[in-house]
Structures are given as structure tokens and as C-alpha cells.
Image (tube, grey):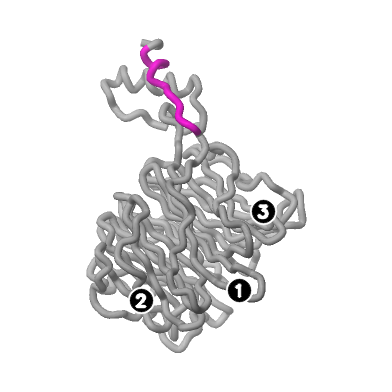
Amino acid sequence: MLVLAASCVVSLQASAQRLGTEFRVSTTSAGIHQHPSVAQDPSGRFVVVWESSTSGEILGQRYAADGARLGTEFRVTAAGSRPRVGSDLFGNFVVAWLGSGIFGRRFSAAGAPLGAEFRVDATTGFQQLGLAVAVLTHGGFVVAFSEEDGSGSGVVARRFDAAGVPLTGEFRVNTYTTSEQRAYSIGADAAGGFVVVWHSSASSVHGQLFDAGGAPVGTEFQKSSADTDFGRPSVAVAPGGEFLVAWQAQGPLTQAFDIFAQRYDRAGALLGGEFRVNTYLTSAQYEAQAAVTRDGEYVITWNSLQSATNDIYAQRFARTGAPLGGEFLVNTYTTGFTESPSVAATTGAFTIAWGHDSGGTNHIYTILGQRFRSGMALGDVDGSGTIDVGDVFHLINFLFAGGAAPVG
């Protein structure tokens, strides 16, 4: 039995593999195109949205699972900035953006609008800052944002059903209310629950879990040191409900910013300690974004000043937090400047999109992207990041249990 189990433990390359070449997302050559957001459905199809700062529009482009364009570049709205997109299990997607308030619009998997633009924020007359959106398992969605609350700004959210009808009014997410709280990311689990993370002006990362009915689970949690953290958190929720939060912070070994992360179980309890994501320590690392594949592999991408300009890097982790390979360069075109990476994942693959400034005298601003195969080790059933004796014992238990799924 041990020989049989060991013979089943076969490894593939641990490093991420490029699927095709780097591609240009934005086709409009004029104007400044920046701040992309990408969402991917279980079949591998994905959509990228971004803002055109020159025209004031929010634009988008859909792609098939193999990276082929689906249709042409389309307009989400005539006036908006900082868009965020989320996709459901069938490829339908919702885009939210900042304007004179918080607005949104739903689209079918074919890219057809599902109704008109709608207003997300129920309380008008306040300045809105920060924005995040996540599509829930039943097809509904939740939007979180920050608005003035008399003591700076607070994080509020609003839930909608699959038809875009509000299920609630605005509800407050944060309980610590002193000074500024700015929403940055939402992640949804397979049971319909979600977690919101935000940055507090107390220089710390905070979060709150919610169940499928929108009720808070436990209390607000804080994870980062108040004397070193800069914030800008991003959350990725695995199908089982465990999740990872990544953020940028001033590292203890350097005066430059580094990327850190922390894993949590489905109840919000810590899984291990916080860990550094980047291994290059000489220059600043910032704008962390996290995603998780449907088979439980975390991907964190960020902007790095490793070069004379800057580039997009990424690092993959097993569900245990063990690194899978080393950090790697995402972009292949390295002339000019990069900004605002966004990552989305599906089973065995992920897509990263980012903004690019050509530099020089012309400063052509475009949106670029790259697809990857996750390359997780085939026999790594315990999620440790390597093929080891733990995988053999997991497989033995699996066989003696009559084929029940092994637990990592």
C-alpha cells in the first residue's frame, strides 16, 4: 500500500507557467488608461475593466478561457473612476465605480448590460473614498466603500440580490470609528459569507467577517503592527472559508515598504504568524493584491521598485502558507512604469492585469495583462508546497477511508 501511495505522488513544476504572452487590454490609443480590475469565473473566462482618465469613461474587455478576446472593448459608463469588478459562477459580472457617489451596473456573461446603471450608496451628500465589490455564491453581490462619518470616514457596505435589487440599506462595517477608515477589499466564500478588510489611519489593517445573511461573525479583528504598517490590504477567500490578507508595510529589516500576509481560518482565527511575501528587500514593494485559485492556491502580486523604473512581481503559496517556487516577474515589457496590479484566479490558473506608462516624452498609458497556469504540484495533497512524507500519509488515509477526500 505504501509503495502504491508513493507511486501516486507525482510532481509537476512548482513555478508558475505563462499561458501565452503578455497582451494589451486597452485598444484605445489616446488618453490615460489606468487602475484596472480583473475578475475570472470558474470556466476561466475573465473580464478586465479600467478607467480612462482623459475621457472620464470606465471601459472593459472580455476574454475567453484561452485568452482570446470576446467582442470588442466596451463602455461601462460615461463618467467614473476607480472601477472594481466581480464575477459570478456563470460569468455574469457587476462593475462598481466612484462618481458623484457610488454606482454600479450588471452585465451578462455575453457582455450585455442587465439593466441600467444604479446608485449603490443610499446616503448622499458625503464624500465617498475607497471601494470594493464581491459577487456572492447565490449571484447577489456586496459593495463596500468609505464615506464621511463625522470623525473622518468609516466603512459601510450594502448587499444586493442577483437581480441588483438592494437587500439592505447601508450598514456600518467597522466598530473602531476614530479618524479615517478606508475600504480596500472584499472576499466571498462558497457558503455565501464574506469578509471586508480596510486600512485605518491608526496605521493598521482591520477586518470583519459576515455570514450569508449579512450578520457580523465575531468582532472586528486587527492584524498588523501599529508602528510599522501602512495598510492597503487585500483579501482572498478560499472555497472552504479560510482566507488570507496581504498588505504593504514598512518592514523591520529595511526602511522601504514590504509585502506581508496572514492566514485565517473560516472563523477568523489566526493560522500561523504573519509572513513576508517578497524576498527582494532593497527597494519598495507596494500595492499588494491577493487571489486564490479554486483548488486553494494563493497568489499575491504587487508593484516593485527592483528595477530603475518598477515592475510587477508575484508569489504563489500553498494553502498552508508555504511558498510555491520563488517570487517572479510578471511583466515582460520592462521599459517605462507599472502601476495598480489586479489579480483573479480560477482552477489551476490566474490572470494579472496592470497599468503601464511608456515613459519618455509621449507617456502612452495602457492596460496590459498576462495569464498563468498555477503549476501546483500534482501530488501535494497536504498543501505543504512540496511532495513529502506528509503527502504519502494523507494518501494512505485517503485509500483506507475508501476514497474520501483527503483533508489538508
Q: Position of residue 95 (x, y in %)?
A: 36, 70
Residue type, numbered disc 2:
Arg
Queried whether the magenta region covers residue 6, the answer comes back as yes
Q: Number of marks in the image?
A: 3
Q: Which residues are magenta?
A: 4-13
* Residue 267 visible within the image: no
> Disc 2 designates what residue?
75
Residue 244 horizontal/vertical position (percent): 50, 49
Q: Secondary structure at mark 2?
A: strand
Side of 239 where 13 appears, left or right: right
Inter-mark Cα distance, 3 to 1: 28 Å
- Identify the residue at image location x=37%, y=62%: 47
How busy is the neighbourhood of tag 2: few (under 14 within 10 Å), some, or many (20 plus)? some
In what element is the residue under mark 1? loop
- Residue 231 in magenta stretch: no
The residue at which mark 3 appears reads as 258
Q: In this rendering, is residue 127 above or below 11?
A: below
User: Which residue has dot 1 on it?
Assistant: 363
Label 1 Cα crowd, 10 Å radius (few <14 / some 14-19 / many 20+):
some
Q: Are marks 3 and 1 in contact (CB under 8 Å)?
A: no
Q: Earlier in the sequence, mark 2 or mark 1?
A: 2
Foreground pick, 294 / 58: 58
x then y, percent, for residue 185:
47, 62
Q: Which mark is residue 72?
A: none
Q: Earlier in the sequence, mark 2 or mark 3?
A: 2
- For badge 1, the amino acid type reads His
Q: Earlier in the sequence, mark 3 or mark 1?
A: 3
